[in-house]
Every structure is written in structure tokens, then in C-alpha cells.
Amino acid sequence: EEVFDRGAVLFRYGFDEKRKGIFKVKEFEEKFAEYMGAKYALGVASGTAALRVALAALGIGPGDEVITQAFTFVATVEAIMEAGATPVIAEVDKSLNLDPDDLESKISERTKAIIPVHMLGVPARMNEILKVAEKHNLKVLEDSAQACGSSYKGKKTGRSEEHTSELQSH
């Protein structure tokens, strides 16, 4: 309401004259990054868009395979397909998250990334997933849309680099 009441616009970029110095999306990105303990955050229109942008940033494209889990929202698979990659579906464990025990059996020479989805506020077993990823030199993109704000071993979900550094220090 504040944005509409002040006559500002919702877009992240441009319209500087119309927005009268009000940058709500930028403000949200900065506050969200701080909350997550991240250097940056990027506001996008949907979870599908977030995954698609992240896959592009990771260089995932045609001919690549991306492993994700059987229980997820359709956006996970849509984003992989929109990138031109092939989704490979792995089993879930009793927490309804990616089963690290099934993960390694899904890896092929075309596998480039793994997308664990933290389901229903419950974090996936990231240490085990990251060990498999590290062994096979795979990228990991955590989808935390259904668990935003949850933590794994004291660190916010969606922050693979933090979990990786924890693994390397042990």
C-alpha cells in the first residue's frame, strides 16, 4: 500500500523520476540479503524465475543434466527445462527432501548440478548432498522457497557456500 500511496513504482530499475527516490525492491533486496547473511539478493517475479536466473548464472544449458527430487513444486523442473537442460529425478527420504543415498546413482557424465529442495520448512541433509557434489565436481543450487528462514546446522538454507566451507574445515 505504501508504494501505491506514495505513487512509486514497483520495478527494480528505471523510472527514477517517477519513483521520487523510493526504491522498494532495492530496499527489500538489501534487507533480505542481510537477513540471510548473504552479500547480495536479487528480487525476481517468482520462484521459477529465481531458479532460472540461478541456473543461467551457473552456466547450465542444453545437453546438461540437473538432478532434483521427486517431491517438489513444478517450478524446479520447469526452470531446468527452460534452461534447456534435462531434469533427472531422485528419490526423497522420510523428510520429503532429496535422499543423498539415491543421489549418487543418478549422476552421469552429463550431470552438471544438483537442486535439493528444502520442503515444508524442513532442511535437506546438505552435508551429505555436498559431499556427493564435491566428489563429482557438481554445482549445488539450494531451492529454499518452501523453507525460507529455516536453518541447517545453524546456517540459513539456500547458502550452499556456507555449508561447503563447513565441510572443508572438518
Image: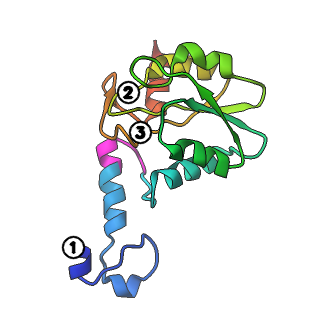
Quadrant location of the N terminus? bottom left
Count neighbours of disc 3 (C-alpha within 10 A) and say few if under 14, some if 14 to 19, many if 20 or more: many
Q: State which quadrant residue 26 falls in.
A: bottom left
SS category of the residue bearing label 1: loop
Magenta-drawn segment:
33-40
Of callouts 2 and 3, the N-terminal one: 2
Count neighbours of disc 1 (C-alpha within 10 A) and say few if under 14, some if 14 to 19, many if 20 or more: few
* Residue 139 spot, x, y in % from top left: 61, 32
- The reply to whether the magenta stretch includes residue 100 is no
Kind of residue indicated by mark 2: Pro
Q: Left or right of 92: which side holds 122?
A: left
SS category of the residue bearing label 2: loop
Instruction: Write down the residue under mark 3.
Output: 144
Query: Disc 2 versus disc 3: distance between alpha carbons?
Result: 8 Å
Kind of residue indicated by mark 3: Ser
Query: Disc 1 versus disc 3: distance between alpha carbons?
Result: 27 Å
